[in-house]
Amino acid sequence: MNRGFRIRRAIARAALRVARWKTVGTVPQKGILVGAPHTSNWDWVATIAMCWSSRVQPTVLIKKEFFKGPFAPLLRATGGVPLDRANPGETIRALLETAKGNESFLLCIAAEGTRTKTEFWKSGFYRISQQTGLPISLGFIDGATKTVGVGPTFTPTGDIGADMNLVREFYSDKLGINPENRTEPRLREESSS
């Protein structure tokens, strides 16, 4: 582990300790980490701290609008990649090409796509996993218990309803920082399967 990453790890551990947040589970070295419930901008901070404290440098998809202004260098330095949500294909293809030859590539995606309550999750995490074979790990943040962590990892079976039932069961007691903004894990594609 290089000196810069040792410093980041120490900062992350100290920040979690000072904030009295605990981490649970094992952050994977490679795959897709779903971040949910996504109800606050603090979700990003907690996820970065969890990953860094576990010696993992995540790649985090963040809507491109956040990269305008003074926070852009910070977002890039912490693994943020701007995503044009109207045309995500080019960014996703470039990231997946990077993942092919890299043993430590963790793509973090907030499946809800927004911090406000919506009807459905975005299905990108599921489709990317199906296309690449990268496993999906269920990351979470729960304000009530001040816990950020990683739960089960799975590879989609193709039975979207059954796979999402597993996801719903895991997130059933995870409320996020602002519970009123939590979206039930449901994909629009489930109604057509």
Image (cartoon, grey):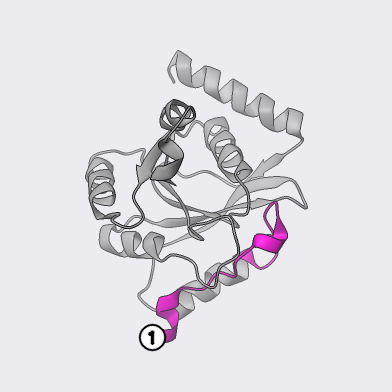
The residue at 32%/59% (across/down) is 128
Give residue 165's position: percent from left, percent from top.
54, 76
Q: Is residue 186 magenta?
A: yes
In this rendering, the answer to whether 128 lies above or below 20 is below
Magenta segment, prevailing SS (helix, strand or loop): loop
Q: Is residue 163 magenta?
A: no
Residue, far bottom: 192
Residue, far front: 69
Give residue 116's position: percent from left, percent from top.
59, 59
Q: Which residue is mark 1?
A: 192
In this rendering, the answer to whether 7 lies above or below 150 is above
Neighbour tally class for label 1: few under 14, some 14-19, many 20 plus, Cα within 10 Å: few
For residue 80, side relative to residue 101 (left or right): right
The residue at 46%/14% (across/down) is 3
Say which amino acid is labelled 1.
Ser
The residue at 34%/60% (across/down) is 129
For residue 82, side relative to residue 11 (left or right): left
The residue at 53%/22% (across/down) is 8
Give residue 10's position: percent from left, percent from top.
60, 21
Image quarter of the C terminus: bottom left
